[in-house]
Image (cartoon, rainbow, N blue to C red):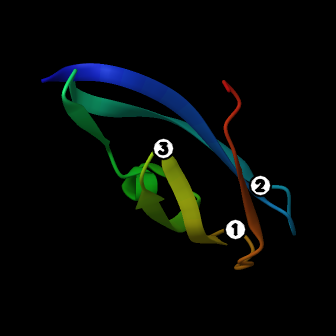
Amino acid sequence: MGVIDQTLIELTCVSCDASERVSVVESGSQYGGSWENPAGMFVGFNSVWTLGFRPELAGAKCLSCGNSDTRATYPDT
């Protein structure tokens, strides 16, 4: 198994404008792969993800201000 895809994910708090960016990889082979769960990669946010075509944010909380109004973007797509 090797790395078959990679993407950047940026979380931004709508309330206090705190943001953080991480790189996430998909491991597997030509027969299929799976994305690593980015939840544990973020230091400034508690987040929950659904893993499918690519990781999608299910919910997040900013640890700077406590707000749950958080936006996920994919800067490299």
Q: Height in image: 30 above or below 61?
A: above
Q: Return the x and y of residue 35 as percentages of the image width and height.
A: 34, 42
Looking at marks 2 and 3 on the same chain, the residue that comes earlier in the sequence is marked by: 2
Which residue matches tag 2?
18
Please give the label number shown on residue 54: 3
Looking at marks 2 and 1 on the same chain, the residue that comes earlier in the sequence is marked by: 2
Looking at the rendered structure, the secondary structure element under dot 3 is loop
Label 2 or label 3, whichever lies nearer to me, is: 3
Looking at marks 3 and 1 on the same chain, the residue that comes earlier in the sequence is marked by: 3
Residue beneath the point at 67% across and 37% down: 74
Residue beneath the point at 75% across and 74% down: 65
Q: Height in image: 42 above or below 23?
A: below
Which residue matches tag 1?
64
Residue beneath the point at 40% across and 23% down: 5
Disc 2 from disc 3: Cα separation: 23 Å
Q: Return the x and y of residue 54 as percentages of the image width and height.
A: 48, 44
Q: In which quarter of the image is residue 32?
A: top left
Disc 2 from disc 1: Cα separation: 7 Å
Is the residue under label 1 in contact with that under label 3 (CB below 8 Å)? no
Looking at the rendered structure, the secondary structure element under dot 1 is loop
Between residue 36 and residue 62, name the one nearer to us. Answer: 36
Q: Residues within 10 Å of mark 3 (few under 14, many from 20)?
A: some
Q: Return the x and y of residue 41 as percentages of the image width and height.
A: 42, 49
Looking at the rendered structure, the secondary structure element under dot 2 is loop
Is the residue under label 1 in contact with that under label 2 (CB below 8 Å)? yes
Q: Height in image: 40 above or below 5?
A: below
Q: Return the x and y of residue 61 as percentages of the image width and height.
A: 63, 73
Amino acid beneath label 1? Ser
Is the residue under label 3 in contact with that under label 2 (CB below 8 Å)? no
Q: In which quarter of the image is the C terminus?
A: top right
Q: In which quarter of the image is the N terminus?
A: top left
Disc 3 from disc 1: Cα separation: 27 Å
